[in-house]
Amino acid sequence: MAETLEITTLRPAPGLTADDFVEANADIDAYLKRQPGFLWRRIVETGDGRMIDIVAYDSLPHARTGAAGITGEMADSPVHATIDHDSVDWQLTTALHHVT
């Protein structure tokens, strides 16, 4: 199975931290768990303070639907206030190699 990854790189909003961003994701985590094709999610922080949020789905159509809901169904989520929106880089891509 080829995983489709939603990869978002961002910085926390001014005055906020990576922990603030992670804590504000509680409702997004619950939303993702309800989405068809959702496999897993990881949030990491880089050495320069950027966040990389990776969500895996089982297909591109499921990834597109899940991602659309973050700004649609979940538009009122507190997570949106924790993001420096000018720093966001978002993409969907297919995993080329997977080792378990």
Image: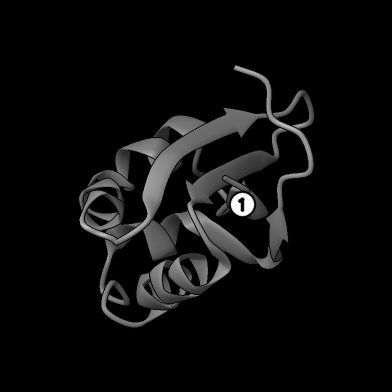
User: Callout 1, which amino acid?
Assistant: Leu
Asked if residue 10 is positioned above or below residue 76 in the image, the reply reads: above
In the depicted view, which residue is nearer to us: 84 or 34?
Answer: 34
Query: Residue 66: horizontal and vertical position, in percent?
Result: 40, 68
Indicate the quadrant containing the N terminus: top left, top right, bottom left or bottom right: top right
Extreme-top residue of the structure:
100
Q: Residues within 10 Å of mark 1 (few under 14, many from 20)?
A: many
Which residue is at 32% across, 77% downward?
75
At numbered mark 1, what does the secondary structure look like: helix, strand or loop? strand
Query: Residue 49: horizontal and vertical position, in percent?
Result: 70, 33
Query: Residue 96: horizontal and vertical position, in percent?
Result: 79, 43
**In the visual, does 16 lie left or right of 92?**
left
In the depicted view, which residue is nearer to us: 1 or 3?
Answer: 1
Which residue is at 40% across, 42% downward?
39
Examine the image and state in which quarter residue 34 appears: bottom left
Q: Which residue is mark 1?
A: 5
Q: How many marks?
A: 1
